[in-house]
Image: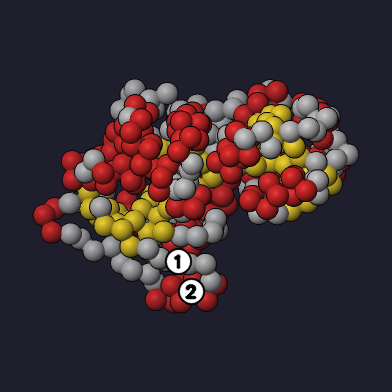
Amino acid sequence: MKTILRSFALFLGLVALASCGGKKEVEPAGGAIPFRLAISPSSGQGALPYVIAKFHLDTKYGFAVEQVDFAAPGQQYMLARTDAADVFPGNFAEVQRQRKAGIGIKSFRAFESYSNQIVVPAGSDIRSFADIKGRRFGQFGTTMVDWLILRAAGKRAYGFDIEKDATAIGGAPPLLNQMLSRGSIDAAIQFRSVALSPVATGQLRVVGDIPQLIKQAGFDPNAYYLLWNVTDKWLERHPDPNAIRKLDAMFAEAYRILATNDQVWEEIGKQVGVKPELIPAFRDGTRKAENPPYRPELIAATQRLLDAIVATTGPAAVGVTRVDPDAFLFPAEPEGSSK
């Protein structure tokens, strides 16, 4: 699998990319189907392409894969708009927003379920979400889906809106850990991977997580979160239905390897800088979250969750009010997800 590292961290770089239209897909020799896979390695999205390359799944399924790396959330949509990427991850709400803005994309497989955690200093008196009311709460973005769910599900399950009834303090995920240690904040939402080390060493303690809160609020924790998406342009270039079916089948086999092969996680853990003693916890947590169910009936479950978010935050905070069924493809064989 060919990997091209591209950094789109600067706005001017994005503008330049838009003006030139991005690097076009080149048909490889030998009849392999090309696709450009955009991921953010720093966000922990590199496991699947690593397995595809290591086990030569691209060759097995007849693809020529070019990896395109991006740095910040949201840049994958600029890549899609400028036809510089074909397949990429994104959360369900942002996919709906981008479609509304005119980008032709569809989801074809679930990538990750809700898994972010609520953490506090080990000695804190906070024991559950209920105790966060009136406290200083760290967050990494008040427009992020996880924050909107904290507001909506928290209000339904515990009777308060965390944005209005607590003091929200922003910071990058690594900084939130430092702020908790210094006592600058009382609790925080945190990525599972970023909380892994301080929780394992006893510096922080987990008092809840997003799927637990969703369930407590009466919603389905299997509602869509992060999805794998493909551009309409790629589908138009490869109109044979077997193309997207083979793409989905390749992803499914890669996930089966990730679910059963412990050795590959030793390699992935080293690549992303996980301490050797924490690799089993890193592996198990990622396995639990990745490749969740992807079924047509979960569109309705996701719509119910979106309805609650809109009712709490208002439509402007979300940007959409409807989960469009036409935004989803279901190319898998009847057995669907491995979970």
Does residue 38 lie above or below 19 as drawn?
above
Q: How many marks?
A: 2
In the shown orientation, is residue 324 left or right of residue 206? left
Residue topped by disc 1: 7
Q: Amino acid at mark 1?
A: Ser
Residue topped by disc 2: 13
Q: Secondary structure at mark 2?
A: helix
Residue located at (53% from left, 71% from top): 10
Residues 100 and 137: in front is: 137
Q: Is residue 202 visible?
A: yes
Q: Is residue 311 visible?
A: no
Residues 202 and 264: in front is: 202
Label 1 near label 2: C-beta < 8 Å? yes
Quarter-wise, where is residue 268 in the image? top left
Residue located at (49% from left, 71% from top): 14
List x then y, in percent, for residue 38: 40, 55
